Image: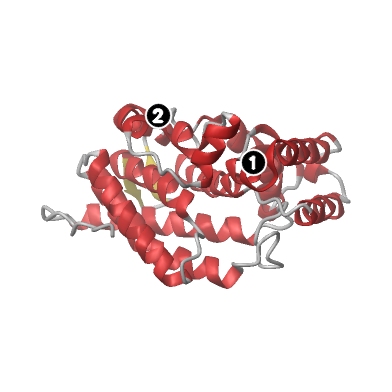
Amino acid sequence: MTVIPASLPRVQVSQTQSCLCDLIAETAYRALLAELAAWPKPGLVSCVDNGSHDDMNAAMLRTSAEVLQPFFRELALAGSENSSMGALREIGMRAEVAMLAATGGVNTHRGTIFGLGLLCAAAGISGEVSARRGVVVHRKLGPIVARKWGTDIRRGPIPLHSHGSAALRRHGAGGARLEAAEGFPNIYQVGLPALRLGRALAPANENAASVQTCFALIAAIRDTNILHRGGAEGALYATSSAATFLSNGGVGKPDWRVRAAAAHEGFIARRLSPGGCADLLAMTLFVDALEAGM
């Protein structure tokens, strides 16, 4: 049985620091809800349907997000206190226990706890409270993660039975660990450009921008969840389907919902679910909210 150590004693937290961490956690929570609300996302749970999943639905994902919000606050506070990767990992372990307790053992957000949690910690280092925007950061969050914790992320324990580890052994996919250690390059090179393009193609439609981003991530990334469910053949289908949606105009054409829904049904028929891309979509929305104007 894994023993989760109790939280380490905290130094006294200033009112400003406490407010900053509350706002970072709120931003992370809202990013998870925005990811959930986006539809159609191929194979993924949304407020419309359960995608390729028999074991989870929108209500469960909302509950999971609510349970995780206090842990995102802890991670932001730990970052502001210059904590080690070991301290962040301890918070993440407790967050995972709480998530599994709330969902009856279903893994709704394990990847998000890791990736979004690290970005919350980085925001605790770089952020400050803004009367106009809530939180602003003065340095990009991904590079902070890579510089401060990248070495420890690479050296950290590898879960032997996780889908990501199995995909790494079988297909050579890098997964969430490499993405984080390198400073989340797919957020900056794929996610944010696609989000901004989606907003340009479909002004005032954040759902469309999120869908554009999700398809762009699927087209660009070897998602370990897809590799676990569908192998190399499933991964090829997923990237090809997403690339076709984008090359046909993405969300910039009037029929984009019909085409996106057709791709969604194709993923469901093959039981494919790009969970890693869903995590990166939520992280992209979080980074965009805090790094706007950078």
Residue position for label 2: 143
Cβ atoms at labels 1 and 2 below 8 Å apart = no
Name the amino acid type tagged 2: Pro
Q: Where on the picture, by quarter, is residue 212?
A: top right
Foreground disc of the pair 1, 2: 1
- The x and y percentages for residue 242 are 76, 40
The percent coordinates of residue 102 (x first, y second) are 43, 71
Please state which of residues 201 and 159 is positioned toward the viewer in this rendering: 159
Residue assigned mark 1? 227
User: In the rendering, at what x and y percent does residue 182 appear?
Assistant: 44, 27
Residue 66, by quadrant, is bottom left
Point 65% across, 38% down: residue = 217
Q: Residues within 10 Å of mark 2 (few under 14, many from 20)?
A: some
Mark 1 Cα-neighbour bin, 10 Å: few <14, some 14–19, many ≥20: many
At a point 55% along the width and 61% down the height, the residue shown is 33
Quadrant containing the N terminus in the rendered view: bottom left
Secondary structure category for the residue under label 2: helix
Mark earlier in primary sequence (1, 2): 2
Nearest to the observer: residue 213 or residue 23: 213
The image shows residue 252 at horizontal and vertical percentages of 81, 43
Q: Is residue 138 above or below residue 65?
A: above
> What separation in Å lies between label 1 and label 2 (alpha carbons)?
28 Å
Residue 238 horizontal side relative to residue 19, left or right: right
Q: Is residue 249 left or right of residue 65?
A: right
Q: Amino acid at mark 1?
A: Leu
Task: Confirm whether residue 108 shows in the render.
Answer: yes
Q: Nearer the viewer, residue 83 or 250?
A: 83
Q: Residue at x 53, y 40 (%)?
A: 166
Element at label 1: helix
* Camera sees residue 20: no
Q: Residue at the location (71% across, 67% down)?
A: 49
When the figure is inspected, residue 174 is found, relative to residue 23, above or below; the finding is: above
